[in-house]
Image (cartoon, grey):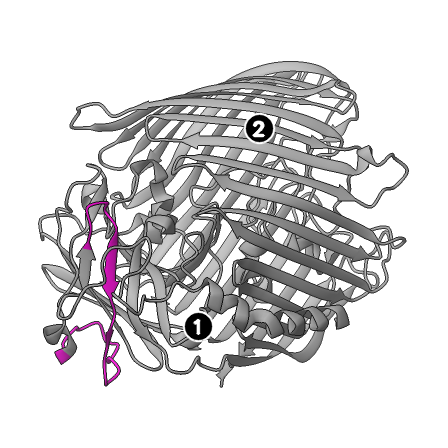
């Protein structure tokens, strides 16, 4: 902790001078801003130039807006709106077919964004989810704004809502290379609806944002409106269609926001105490517990220090965190679950290294193959069992052209099979902006003691991010860990990745090496001692069709050996995908695999795959139901060979809208497997989450799930009520049972009530 405090105050001491040099101020001679359209002169609030650049002017108001979603204040009549939105889909560059009017106001305390979203009543309005941070928000009609508060053309803070008033905010890093969808902050929002339009009013306190010092602020800003009834995506500035759902994160193409005058940067001090009481039963503990009552409290503190943010946590508790959903695992590698704990979420993207994302990403995707150098889910765990976090601190932010992050966490002693002493985790990350949108950086992590309770484990690395154009990006890194018994080269990992992602063509090339002795014990390494070569190509076309918007043909080769160049995995894939104009998608994929298994592994508690050289393949088909349906999600199946036998799969993952307040989210995967000399068996996962959204800031949910591989059956119920911005009450019940043993005996049960209160100064 002493090292963290020293670094924090050293960075704060140099922050004002460094930041002032980086801020693009207005020219005293003509009011112009470099690389921007001319500054609009009142009463104009918007200007555009021949190169497509846009500058907008925020308007100061004397009286704060009443955030009620009605747009009835005099300010809306006195100030012109901005409405020149352009499509990316379905017709790139064409004007929007449904008018959207936007206003940007500010006062001494907050920035206000308001919108009037006109819509033809004959066009379906898709609005069926209003819970906070719901994954379905983007699949509803929605309105969003993104701020690039440092105007670094790389990073942004995104705020969005739907016609039902859903609340969601995200942090975007490197123009959408990494999204933190679980980041939350304090802001206010109201939405109202009429027959021909819906209305949005947002109030975002300056205390909730980070920006450079100085009275005159110049930010990046952009707006997005999604009209799902027409599968239409529109933006305030022209964005490339190839950017897909991440287009709003392209802040290098955002408008320039001028006119903000902040006389005195608001003091940023937040104290968030909590209290929790728990009733716990754990029959697998040593000794077992039954209805064990406990009560405790803790504290989180956040303070602004120049452009940096310092966070401290004491006696942290995460009882309110949602359970991970059960998954089918047919590989010899561990599953991947993203971070969900609030303390670790803010600034999460800063600690991303080498282009490997840390959190949930739009569109999902499989777990990373490359190492994650710092993975916060390793903190608070020993022998796969949770242990208490005693205290921790973090500093994140920007100092001029530098992005910095430093974290220190101490966790309590714990562990069952291999008891570990009190453990310290340290992570330090710095990145330097270069060229127009590129960056280079370094990372250092330390775990003391290591996961064996002995020596210290340390990792250091350098990486680079180079977007050579809007569609072409290069990522590279080199990292080294503390050596064990191997040579220096054995403790290295490096990676180079090129990605070209245009609308008509796509290409990915990657080479990744992980040495036999490379061990990032404050991170995640799912596969050890390997070299990976990967290539993927895609061709897409947009036919002139009333029902088919786009088709794509894609193929890839994934070749993995150990560092002795002995083959471990070889996968060839090809797929064809059809995107319909109504938002539905259909995909067929063929795969041929070869796996060399040198150590047997368990598929279930009773079935395993033995040592051998296996070749197999399968065909998979899926249909993804678009957002216009009451039943959405992906349904499909696959069939083929599996190691020395056969496999058939059927699955459905999606959402069933019962009412606009109540929904079901099934997660079903059924796998029928036959292996030689063994009886056929199944590996199934069945789960369903029921959600009742009382208001956008109050939601009750229940999750039931069963995994046949382990025989576990679990359930949980959770009420989350944000009774005032940033302050919450949680009521959580969960239990797990073993279905293998007679009578389905109880394994564990927890009932917890937690209350937090945010105090801002």
User: Is 54 a magenta residue?
Assistant: yes
Whether residue 738 is visible: yes
Question: Which numbered disc covers residue 510?
Answer: 2
User: In the image shown, does 102 or 688 lie closer to the viewer?
Assistant: 102
Q: CA distance from mark 2 to mark 1?
A: 39 Å
- The reply, left or right, for residue 425 in relation to residue 304 is right
Q: Quadrant of residue 706?
A: top right
Q: Is residue 208 above or below residue 625?
A: below
Q: Is residue 63 above or below residue 24?
A: below
- The reply, left or right, for residue 141 in relation to residue 449 is left
Where residue 519 sits in the image (x, y, percent)?
Answer: 77, 42
Where residue 79 sits in the image (x, y, percent)?
Answer: 14, 72
Q: Which residues are magenta?
A: 48-74
Q: Is residue 438 above or below residue 164?
A: above
Q: Secondary structure at mark 2?
A: strand
Question: Which numbered disc covers residue 208?
Answer: 1
Q: Quadrant of residue 407?
A: bottom right
User: Is 306 a magenta residue?
Assistant: no
The N terminus sits in image quarter: bottom right
**Which tag, 2 or 1, sits closer to the chain's start?**
1
User: In the image shown, does 253 or 576 lie closer to the viewer?
Assistant: 253
Q: In the image, what residue occupies the spot 54% across and 54% down?
A: 349
Question: Which numbered disc covers residue 632?
Answer: none
What secondary structure prevails in the magenta region?
loop
Q: In the image, what residue occupies the spot 24% across and 44% down?
A: 628
Q: In the image, what residue occupies the spot 70% across and 77% down?
A: 294
Mark 2: few/some/many CA within 10 Å (<14, 14-19, 20+): some
Mark 1: few/some/many CA within 10 Å (<14, 14-19, 20+): few
Where residue 354 sits in the image (x, y, percent)?
Answer: 60, 42
């Amino acid at each position: 902790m002493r090292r963290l405090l020293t670094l924090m105050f050293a960075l704060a001491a140099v922050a004002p001078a460094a930041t002032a040099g980086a801020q693009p101020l207005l020219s005293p001679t003509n009011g112009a801003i470099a690389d921007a359209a001319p500054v609009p002169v009142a009463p104009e609030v918007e200007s555009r130039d021949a190169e497509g650049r846009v500058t907008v002017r925020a308007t100061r108001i004397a009286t704060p807006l009443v955030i009620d979603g009605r747009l009835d204040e005099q300010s809306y009549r006195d100030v012109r709106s901005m409405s020149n939105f352009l499509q990316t889909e379905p017709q790139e560059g064409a004007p929007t077919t449904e008018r959207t009017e936007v206003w940007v106001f500010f006062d001494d305390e907050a920035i206000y964004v308001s919108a009037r979203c006109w819509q033809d009543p004959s066009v379906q309005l898709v609005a069926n989810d209003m819970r906070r941070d719901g994954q379905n928000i983007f699949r509803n009609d929605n309105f969003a704004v993104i701020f690039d508060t440092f105007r670094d053309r790389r990073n942004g803070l995104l705020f969005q809502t739907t016609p039902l008033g859903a609340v969601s905010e995200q942090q975007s890093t490197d123009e959408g290379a990494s999204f933190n969808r679980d980041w939350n902050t304090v802001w206010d929002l109201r939405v109202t609806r009429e027959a021909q339009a819906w209305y949005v009013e947002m109030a975002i306190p300056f205390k909730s944002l980070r920006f450079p010092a100085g009275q005159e602020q110049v930010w990046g800003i952009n707006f997005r409106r999604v009209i799902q009834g027409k599968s239409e995506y529109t933006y305030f500035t022209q964005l490339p269609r190839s950017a897909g759902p991440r287009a709003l994160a392209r802040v290098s193409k955002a408008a320039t926001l001028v006119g903000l005058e902040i006389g005195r940067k608001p003091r940023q001090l937040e104290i968030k105490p909590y209290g929790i009481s728990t009733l716990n039963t754990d029959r697998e503990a040593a000794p077992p517990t039954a209805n064990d009552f406990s009560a405790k409290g803790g504290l989180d503190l956040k303070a602004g220090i120049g452009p940096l943010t310092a966070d401290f946590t004491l006696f942290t508790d995460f009882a309110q965190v949602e359970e991970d959903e059960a998954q089918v695992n047919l590989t010899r590698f561990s599953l991947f679950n993203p971070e969900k704990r609030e303390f670790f979420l803010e600034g999460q993207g800063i600690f991303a290294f080498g282009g490997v994302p840390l959190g949930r990403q739009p569109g999902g995707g499989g777990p990373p193959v490359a190492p994650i150098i710092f993975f916060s889910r390793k903190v608070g765990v020993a022998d796969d069992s949770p242990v208490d976090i005693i205290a921790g601190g973090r500093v994140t932010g920007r100092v001029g052209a530098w992005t910095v992050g430093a974290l220190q966490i101490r966790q309590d002693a714990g562990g069952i099979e291999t008891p570990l002493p009190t453990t310290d985790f340290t992570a330090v990350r710095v990145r330097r902006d270069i060229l127009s949108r590129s960056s280079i950086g370094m990372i250092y992590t330390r775990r003391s003691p290591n996961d064996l309770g002995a020596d210290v484990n340390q990792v250091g690395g350098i990486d680079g991010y180079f977007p050579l154009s809007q569609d072409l990006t290069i990522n590279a890194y080199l990292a080294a860990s503390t050596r064990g018994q191997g040579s220096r080269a054995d403790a290295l990992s490096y990676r180079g990745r090129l990605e070209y992602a245009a609308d008509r063509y796509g290409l990915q090339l990657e080479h990744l090496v992980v040495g036999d002795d490379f061990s990032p014990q404050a991170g995640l390494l799912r596969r050890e001692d390997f070299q990976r070569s990967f290539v993927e190509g895609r061709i897409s076309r947009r036919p002139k069709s009333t029902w088919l918007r786009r088709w794509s043909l894609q193929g890839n080769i994934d070749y993995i050996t150990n560092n002795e160049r002995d083959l471990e995995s070889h996968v060839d894939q090809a797929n064809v995908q059809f995107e319909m104009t109504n938002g539905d998608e259909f995909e067929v994929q063929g795969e041929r695999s070869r796996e060399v298994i040198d150590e047997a592994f368990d598929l279930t508690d009773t079935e395993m795959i033995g040592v051998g050289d296996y070749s197999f393949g399968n065909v998979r088909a899926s249909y993804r139901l678009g957002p216009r349906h009451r039943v959405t999600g992906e349904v499909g199946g696959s069939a083929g060979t599996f190691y020395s036998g056969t496999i058939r799969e059927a699955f459905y993952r999606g959402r069933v809208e019962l009412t606009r307040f109540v929904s079901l989210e099934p997660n079903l995967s059924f796998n029928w497997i036959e292996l030689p000399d063994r009886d056929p068996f199944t590996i199934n996962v069945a789960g369903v989450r029921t959600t009742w959204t009382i208001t956008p800031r109050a939601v009750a949910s229940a999750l039931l799930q069963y995994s046949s591989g382990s025989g576990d059956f679990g359930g949980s119920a959770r009420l989350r009520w944000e009774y005032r911005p940033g302050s919450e009450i949680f009521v959580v019940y969960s239990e797990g049972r073993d279905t293998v043993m007679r009578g389905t005996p109880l394994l564990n049960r927890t009932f917890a009530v937690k209350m937090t209160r945010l105090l801002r100064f």
